[in-house]
Image: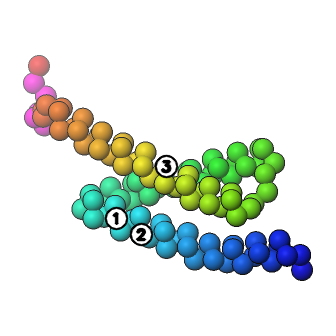
């Protein structure tokens, strides 16, 4: 077996453990920060969409799956989660500023 291929197989096996553990730690930190399962799941829901976009771009550019690309996906997950956090905070602030209306419409 080629040395480069055997190294990739070893690193891929290690990353198969590291990536889910990293996502679990991020979810736990979101739970601590927001005290809400719904908000944490909403933020984590952006990760698959980022992954799909990354895979399409990787395929479109013709890049192969390397260790550097996998680490880049982890960084992409972090950016997607950070964007989700900013959106949740913005939505909460916007809803807090919005005046409350009664359930009955009155002209």
**Seen in the image, is 57 located left or right of residue 20?**
right
Q: Secondary structure at mark 2?
A: helix
Would residue 58 be visible to someone looking at this image? Answer: yes
Q: Residue at x 89, y 80 (%)?
A: 1
Please, which colouring scheme is shown? rainbow
Residue bounds of the magenta highlight: 102-106
Query: Where does label 2 land, which residue?
Result: 25
Task: Let me know if residue 105 is in the magenta part.
Answer: yes
Q: Residue at x 83, y 71 (%)?
A: 4
Image position, residue 20 (x, y; %) = 52, 71
- For marks 2 and 1, give the CA distance: 6 Å
Image position, residue 107 (x, y; %) = 11, 19
Q: Residues within 10 Å of mark 1 (few under 14, many from 20)?
A: few
Q: Main secondary structure of the magenta part?
A: loop
Label pair 2/1, CB-CB below 8 angstroms: yes
| Residue that protrudes farthest toward the top in the picture | 107
Query: Where does label 1 land, which residue?
Result: 29
Q: Residues within 10 Å of mark 2 (few under 14, many from 20)?
A: few
């Amino acid at each position: 077996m080629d040395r480069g291929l055997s190294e990739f197989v070893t690193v891929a096996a290690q990353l198969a453990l590291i990536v889910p553990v990293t996502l679990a730690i991020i979810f736990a930190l979101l739970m601590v920060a927001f005290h809400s399962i719904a908000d944490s799941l909403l933020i984590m829901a952006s990760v698959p969409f980022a992954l799909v976009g990354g895979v399409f771009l990787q395929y479109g550019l013709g890049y192969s799956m390397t260790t550097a690309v996998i680490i880049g996906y982890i960084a992409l997950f972090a950016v997607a989660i950070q964007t989700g956090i900013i959106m949740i905070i913005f939505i909460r602030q916007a809803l807090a500023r919005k005046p409350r209306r009664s359930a009955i419409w009155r002209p």
